[in-house]
Image (cartoon, grey):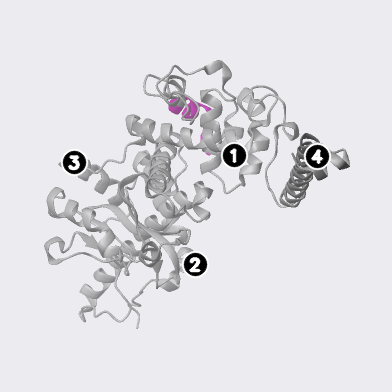
Amino acid sequence: MDPLLLLAGVSPEDDEMEEQERAAALMTIMIAGALEAREIQNARRRAHRLYLCRRELLPDPRSETPWQRLWESQTDRAFITTMGFDVATFRYILEGPNGFGRRWNMSTIPREDVDNAGNPRLGRRSLDGAGALGLVLHYLGSAMLEITLQQIFALTPATLSRYLDFALDILYDTLPRLNDAAISFPCSQDEFDEMSNLITARHSLLEGAFGSIDGLSLAVEESDDPEIENATYNGWKSDHRINNVLVFSPKGDIMMAVLNCPGSWHDSHVARPIFKKLLTDVPDGYFLVADTAFPRGTLSIQGKIRAPIKAGERIPADPMIQAEVLRENRQLLSYRQTAEWGMRTVQGGFGRLRIPLPISSENKRLRLLGNICRLTNIRARRVGISQIRNVYMPLWEMSEDERLWADMKNMLFGEVIKRDRVSRFHLVVDNNE
């Protein structure tokens, strides 16, 4: 033992205890400082965070929420206004042996702390099947922020994100099993004839036309990966895009779709599966109508994609033949408009497409686009929300008396129609000159 310590009356144990006390005090100060710094950092973050916590939401997602009030109303007007589907169509997707509700109730919501092979605990879920379907239709049908969805369904951010991802998966698995959601290309002579008859009832010179085709370019987020960034960059639009090609029938539904292709691809590359379909499965004499800028494929499918006459293109000099060519051209130009109507139906009916698509997951982009295309078909076939369908189907279903009055209207007001603001895009031959 040190004699100096003995003379001072201080034992080694007292000195060691004092050192420990000083270390403990220093550690306490450091922990308190760290907690204070974290609290200051959290306070700064809260000022910029755009989400709501449970105490800021309605207490029970299963009662007295805006969604519950909408669901209990069971009115077509409210359902169509908020989700784009009437009550009967909503129940068509939800109910039945292949419906959304059954899959929601039989599947476990994926979580890291839950056994995905276990039995679902339906009583512990914040939303039932109807609520989950309502959530995903609100999401797809609008460009609203997730904070708005939180308020409508009274869900916290983590629950909303998890439920939405799971519901999109279930919808993607459910829709292909519903007949009215099918994306089906004509496969028999009778089906091609049916489509052609719907068109020739309004455009008599377009015998053999059975649909319209066009490209759809959608904005996508910019990737940090140089290869992906380069693949999605579209020089024509000077932006990052995802390219798609859709084929619409005169009934207003989508007959074929090529989705989720890089924005750097030209439509001629994107549409290759459609060109192959035209070559192998479309009888001679039948064709799709496209815009003048849309590629018409190789010589092997020559005549199976037709478009209006381009500016500066030569036409026959014979006045009789010239008049017939221009008349057919006007009908091609008129029917070509259906592709734009179809694109507007898709983009206007599903506001989520106005937001750049996620770049992080190719599968999630395909899931989003696939759900929207199939829901577009359900809306056209069951709700009747389709400008193409509203123009061409009623004409086919007209009685003889209705067709007589329609012809009389065209005779009386044809000159007025010729002078509308769209007529300047038509080539017209004046026989009096």
Q: Which of marks 2 and 4 is nearer the N terminus?
A: 4
Q: Residue 420 carries which label?
A: 2
Q: Earlier in the sequence, mark 3 or mark 4?
A: 4
Looking at the rendering, in which quadrant would you find the C terminus?
bottom left
- Could you tell me the amino acid type at mark 1? Thr
| Mark 2 → mark 4, Cα distance in angstroms | 97 Å
Q: Where is residue 381 in the image (x, y as percent from the top left)?
A: 39, 36
- Could you tell me the amino acid type at mark 4? Glu
Q: Which of marks 3 and 1 is nearer the N terminus?
A: 1
Residue 88 inside the magenta-drawn segment: yes
Q: Mark 4 points at which residue?
A: 18
Q: Residue at x 18, y 39 (%)?
A: 190
Q: Quadrant of residue 265?
A: bottom left
Q: Where is residue 55 in the image (x, y as percent from the top left)?
A: 75, 32
**Is residue 107 placed above or below 279 in the rendered structure?**
above
User: Number of numbered discs present?
Assistant: 4
- Could you tell me the amino acid type at mark 2? Asp
**Is residue 67 placed above or below 218 in the rendered structure?**
above
Region in magenta = 84-93
Q: Mark 1 points at which residue?
A: 81
Q: In which quarter of the image is residue 181?
A: top left
Q: Earlier in the sequence, mark 2 or mark 1?
A: 1
> Is residue 86 at all visible to an observer of this figure?
no
Q: Nearer the viewer, mark 3 or mark 4?
A: 4
Instruction: Classify mark 2: helix, strand or loop.
Output: loop
Q: Position of residue 73 (x, y in %)?
A: 64, 25
| Mark 2 → mark 3, Cα distance in angstroms | 39 Å
Q: Mark 3 points at which residue?
A: 187
Looking at the image, the residue that sits furthest to the right is 8
Mark 3 and mark 4 residues within 8 Å of each other at the beta carbon: no
| Mark 3 → mark 4, Cα distance in angstroms | 91 Å
| Mark 2 → mark 1, Cα distance in angstroms | 32 Å
